Amino acid sequence: MTAHLLGRHALQLALVGSLFLALPAGLHAAPEIHDAHLNDFGEIVLKGVAFGQGPTVALYDDFSDIEILGESVNLKPQVGSWFKAQSTSSVPFIDEEHGNTSLFVRGDGVSQLEFGVNDNSGPHGLKTFQEVYLSYTIKDLGDFPGPGGTMTEFSTQSATKDAWMMFGNRGDHTGYAVSIGEVAGHDLFIPGWTGGGFNIAGNNTRLTPSYWPHDLRQNWAFGDWNTKMFHAELDPQDPYGDAEGFFSFLNKNAYHVNFRNGNFMEDQRSEGVPYAVWDRIKFFVWMRLGDADVNRVVDEIYVAIGDNANARVLLTNNDSLENSTRVFHLPPTSWTNSEIIAHFPDYLPGGRIYYLHVLDANNATSESLSLCQGCPNPPLLFPVQ
C-alpha cells in the first residue's frame, strides 16, 4: 500500500514488515499504523488501531533551536523546559547525514543539564514520579572519557554517569544531604561506565540482582551515535520491591532490550528518606576525563513521566528496529487508541527514506511505515492496449 501525503511537505508512505519486540510477559495485540499525513502545523498524524494510551512527555530537546550567544548557549527545548542548564560552546555540531544539531557536553563545550518539572506540592518544589522513560543519544568525536580512553578503547577506570536520576539535589549522597537538612536519595545512573562495564545502580541504591547491560559494552559504537533508552515503573504498593522496566540501546552495531527483573529503588527510610519517588534527572554532571582527548556531543534528550511513559513513536532509518542505525523520538502532542499526533523534525534531508514505529506501553511494536520527504511520485502504470 502506498499513499501520498500533502501538508507543508509531501511524503510517500508505505507499510512494510517489522519484527515484534519481545514482550516481558504474555501476548498483546500490537499497534497497527494504517495511514499518516502531515497537518498544517507540520505535525505528523498517525491513524490506526491498538495504540493504547499515550505518555506525558515532560521534556524534549533535539537542540535544533539552540542559540549561540558568544561563548554561552541558550537552550530552547521543543517540549517543556530545563530546570537547570549550564552550557558553553563556540559552535553546535551538525550531523551532515541527518541534518540534526547536537550540543557539545565536553570538549568544544561544557554542558550540565538538569530535568525537573516545577511543582510547589513536591518536597523539593519539583513534581515527583514513580514511572519514567528517558532517552538520549551521544557521540564521541574524540576519545572515550577517562584514563586510558581512546577512540577505540574504553577507559580503565570509572569515567561516566551521563544520566543520573535522583530525589533531591544531592540524591547521590544521602548522608551529606540529611546532615544539612535536605531529604535526598534514590539515585540511579543510567548507565555509568565503571572501568569494567556499563552498570545501572546508584551511590545509595543497590539493585538486586545487579543490572549490567553487557550487550552495550560488547556492541558500543566508538566514534558513532549511541542511543540509550530506559524505562522504570515502580509498584506504588511495593516501591522497593520488583519493578517493571528495561534498558535498551540502538547504534550501528545492534539494537538490544534488557528487561528488568528486580528493584529500581532501595528502602532509605532508616536513613531519613521517607519518600519513594524521584524528582529530577541530571545529564552530564559527572565525567572523569583523565588523559583522554574528550569531545562528546549529545542529541535528542527525551523524558516522559507518569502512566504509560514508555509508549512512544520512533523514526528510524530501517524498516526494523533491529537493523536501524539511528533513531529519533517523535514526542506526541495527543494520543488516543486510534490516532497519534506528534512533532515531526523539519531538518531531515529530502529524498531519503525513514520509517515510523509505534510502541505501546506494553512494549508491543507496530509494523513500520516508510516515508520519504521530497521523493518523486512513482510513475503511473497503464495496461498495454
Image (cartoon, helix red, strand yellow):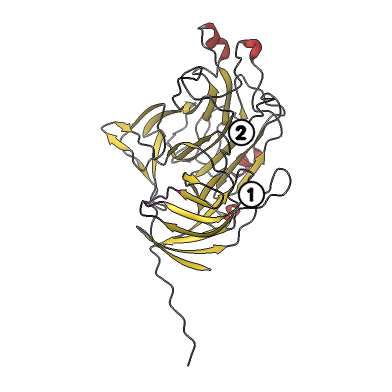
Work out whether mark 2 precedes mark 1 in sequence or the reverse, and give the earlier one.
2
Q: Give the range drawn in magenta.
A: 342-348
Label 1 belongs to which residue? 364
Residue 73 falls within the magenta-colored stretch: no
Q: Judge by depth and name the residue closer to the eye, 37 or 365.
A: 37
Q: Judge by depth and name the residue closer to the eye, 164 or 116.
A: 116
Q: Residue 22: horizontal and vertical position, in percent?
A: 68, 48
- The image quadrant of residue 37 is bottom left
- The image quadrant of residue 236 is top right
**Does any portion of residue 143 appear in the rendered image?**
yes
- The disc labelled 2 sits on which kind of residue? Ala
Identify the secondary structure beneath mark 2. strand
Q: Residue 322: horizontal and vertical position, in percent?
A: 60, 53
**For the point 54% across and 27% down, which residue is it?**
165
Label 2 belongs to which residue? 232
Residue 345 falls within the magenta-colored stretch: yes
- In the rendered image, the residue lying farthest to the bottom is 385
* Dot 1 alpha-carbon crowd within 10 angstroms: few under 14, some 14 to 19, many 20 or more: many
Image-based side of 321 in relation to 385, left or right: right
- The disc labelled 1 sits on which kind of residue? Ala
**Does any portion of residue 224 appear in the rendered image?**
no
Q: Residue 242: horizontal and vertical position, in percent?
A: 71, 29
Residue 92 higher or lower than 28, as above or below:
above
- In the rendered image, the residue lying farthest to the right is 26
**For the point 52% across and 49% down, which residue is it?**
314
Per the model, the C-alpha gap separating discs 2 and 1 is: 17 Å
